[in-house]
Amino acid sequence: MSISPLSPLEDIKTASRFLRGSIAAELENPITGAIPEADTKLLKFHGSYMQDDRDIRDERRKQKLEPAYAFMVRARLPGGVIPPAQWLALDALAQQYASSGLRITTRQTFQWHGILKRNLRAFMQGIHAARATTIAACGDVNRQVISSVNPHLSSQHALVQDWVLRLSNHFLPRTGAYAEIWLGGERVGEAADEEPIYGNNSAYLPRKFKIGIAIPPTNDCDVFANDLGLVAIIENGRLQGFNVAVGGGMGATAGDPSTYPRLGSLVGFTTPEDLIAVAEAVVTLQRDHGDRKERQHARLKYTIDRLGVDWFREQIQQRSGRTLQAARPYQFERNGDRYGWSRGEDGRWHLGLYIASGRLWDRDGLTLQTGLREIARVLKGEFRLTCNQNLVIANVDEADRARIDTLVEQYGLDGYKEQSGIRRHHIACVALPTCGLAMAESERYTPILLPKLEALLDRHGLRDADILLRLSGCPNGCSRPYLGEIALVGRALGRYDLRLGADFVGERLNRLYKENIAEAEILDSLDALFGQYASQRQTGEAFGDFLVRTGVV
């Protein structure tokens, strides 16, 4: 019987000398703005993707020029917490090197676009000087660890943020390649490289791996969309431990029904003392049993569906040497972010700001990037990025609130006060022109789509109704579209799958309602459904729940 070969990327990883490849040499090549394909795969482990501007790709081809290559760089900022001094340093890098300001991602971090190859090393060194890193922000490793938005509203939330940091540090790659390539570190030889978690054959994981922690009653990070989802259980004012869910993931491939989104499966409860051992068991089980032949089936969700949840639970216990208890009771009441001022138990204040598609820049009449820079210069607390591409100005003293309010109003950061319910709760991926996977517009389409949706909602008296809207330029799911009460998933320019019926707390996937349709049909369909919802909904019933109860999906 013949044995299927490994996917090509597996060969690239194992031959990479622990993620070195020829990246260092290619950065010095002045002939092209690109690096070779094999090195682009390895570069992801260092936190960067090579991209080109698709808006001008054809024109450059006609001029016999290579594509307008540049690099996206993503930071690793566990839990999205950023002190003011670090914010200013990261903002300065955006001003000097990036093409489009700062962008808050759906995983609570920043990414920068338009970094030219000749500036890439200096940019990475700037990130390091700001006491941050980009290693493992992308690639087949555990990526950015995310958590609930404001860990300082209670002492228990602060404990959860501590576990975010512990998990993030525990799963960092150990290779010396990052320091050698970007930071001027000396080569100490391959024998010094060890990857006890990711494998000393330097194959790392079969695909990316994501960890998220939610704190009920708010599921603001869509915890069940993660490979490893942890639900913090707090009783009598103390963190008791975490319910453990495995196998979540949003990605799918257009036209391939063997790929699909999946919510994580609860497998039990673990105490804080056992969390690292349990998490490492999950990661290494995926390392050893994930599909390395077909990358489209290489995420943990497919491993679990192939081998079974019960088998996986037993293997976690066997490998970790810990016993998983029965999952503890919990309840989620909402998703999304809270806006405006809220006061923590210690008397300090936290201001939630709405940031459209997470884009902080000074453009199209906006001065958001400048505004946050000015706030950072006076802030004594910290910033916190959210998984919904928004921002919290955290830990503000009572005496400083008026000054912050003045700056927020001066620079147009107070838009949260008048946003519709659907605008407050929308997420959009970057898509065109920089994402190579994009099949349709997403971020650039939201300013066109949202006013039209708001007009429909106004007609039915629903302007303030909280509705989760997710837009994605392709089925890969970076904006978590399969958890939207309404979702548009790009199929081609101007055409989308319309998906409906997720719940408002992130515990039910939506379903395909209409396939590959254009804007007119999308608006007509939603107009009719909004009308039914306005006249037939029950008290307190969310839009997605209404669609399921009435059999629309």
Image (cartoon, rainbow, N blue to C red):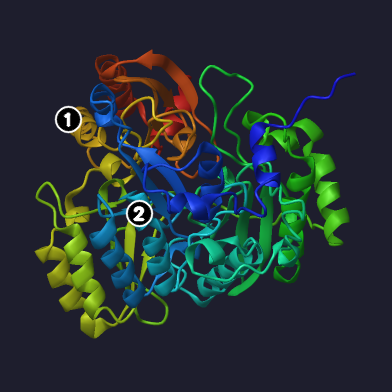
Q: Is residue 232 above or below residue 457?
A: below
Q: First in sequence: mark 1 or mark 2?
A: 2
Which residue extends farthest bottom? 399
Any part of residue 342 in sight: no
Q: Amino acid at mark 1?
A: Ala
Label 1 crowd bin: few (<14), some (14–19), many (20+), radius 10 Å: some
Question: On residue 455, which mark appears?
Answer: 1
- Cα–Cα span, label 1 and label 2: 47 Å
> Where, by quadrant of the figure, is residue 400 drawn?
bottom left
Name the side, left or right, on which 176 lies relative to 499: right
Give the residue at x 30% y 22%.
526
Q: Amino acid at mark 2?
A: Arg
Label 2 crowd bin: few (<14), some (14–19), many (20+), radius 10 Å: some
Q: Secondary structure at mark 1?
A: helix
Give the residue at x 80% y 57%.
324
Residue at the spot of label 2: 118
Name the side, left or right, on which 131 lies relative to 379: right
Residue 343 point in image, percent of width and height = 34, 73
> Where, by quadrant of the figure, is residue 517 drawn?
top left
Residue 533 point in image, percent of width and height = 33, 27
Q: Secondary structure at mark 2?
A: helix
Residue sitting nearer the eye, 483 or 145 = 145
Residue 255 point in image, percent of width and height = 53, 16
Give the residue at x 19% y 31%.
448
Residue 486 point in image, percent of width and height = 38, 31
Q: Is residue 393 above or below residue 482?
A: below
Question: On residue 534, which mark appears?
Answer: none
Whether residues under marks 1 and 2 lie with C-beta atoms below 8 angstroms apart, the answer is no
Assign the N terminus to one quadrant of the image.
Answer: top right
Residue sitting nearer the eye, 260 or 511 = 260
Q: Is residue 416 above or below residue 409?
A: above
